[in-house]
Image (cartoon, rainbow, N blue to C red):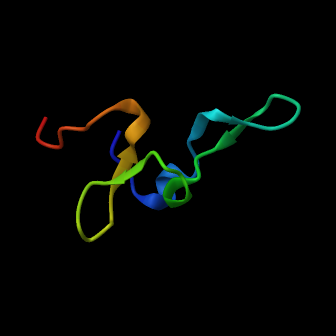
Amino acid sequence: MILSEGEARFKFCPLLKTSDDKMKTCLVTQCMFWRWLDDAKTEGYCGMAGPVNPQG
């Protein structure tokens, strides 16, 4: 799923959990898995899902 940084912040990450086992939201650029789709850094995706083909 290709998202802007602002949109991604509201998605839950399956790897991040609180001490009482509640899911936390995406860390976006602070996460090792985050990958930018373009050089302008306007859109990106979670690299944990694998490579993304923006053409289709």
- Up the image or down, 54 lies above or below 48; here it is below
Residue lying farthest bottom?
Answer: 40
Q: How many marks?
A: 0
Q: Report x, y in % for residue 30.
A: 55, 59
| x then y, percent, for residue 25 | 64, 45
Q: Is residue 20 left or right of residue 7?
A: right
Query: Could you say which is closer to the camera, residue 19 or residue 1?
Result: 19
- Measuring from the top left, give residue 26's x and y in whole percent: 58, 47
Nearer to me, 41 or 32: 32
Would you say 27 lies left or right of 42 here?
Answer: right
Quarter-of-image position of residue 37? bottom left
Q: What quarter of the picture does the C terminus occupy?
A: top left
Choose top left, top right, bottom left or bottom right for residue 43: bottom left
Q: Is residue 56 left or right of residue 7?
A: left
For the point 18% across and 38% down, which residue is it? Answer: 53
The answer to whether 42 is drawn above or below residue 18 in the figure is below
Q: What residue do we see at 39% from left, 31% from top? A: 49
Which residue: 38% across, 40% down?
A: 47
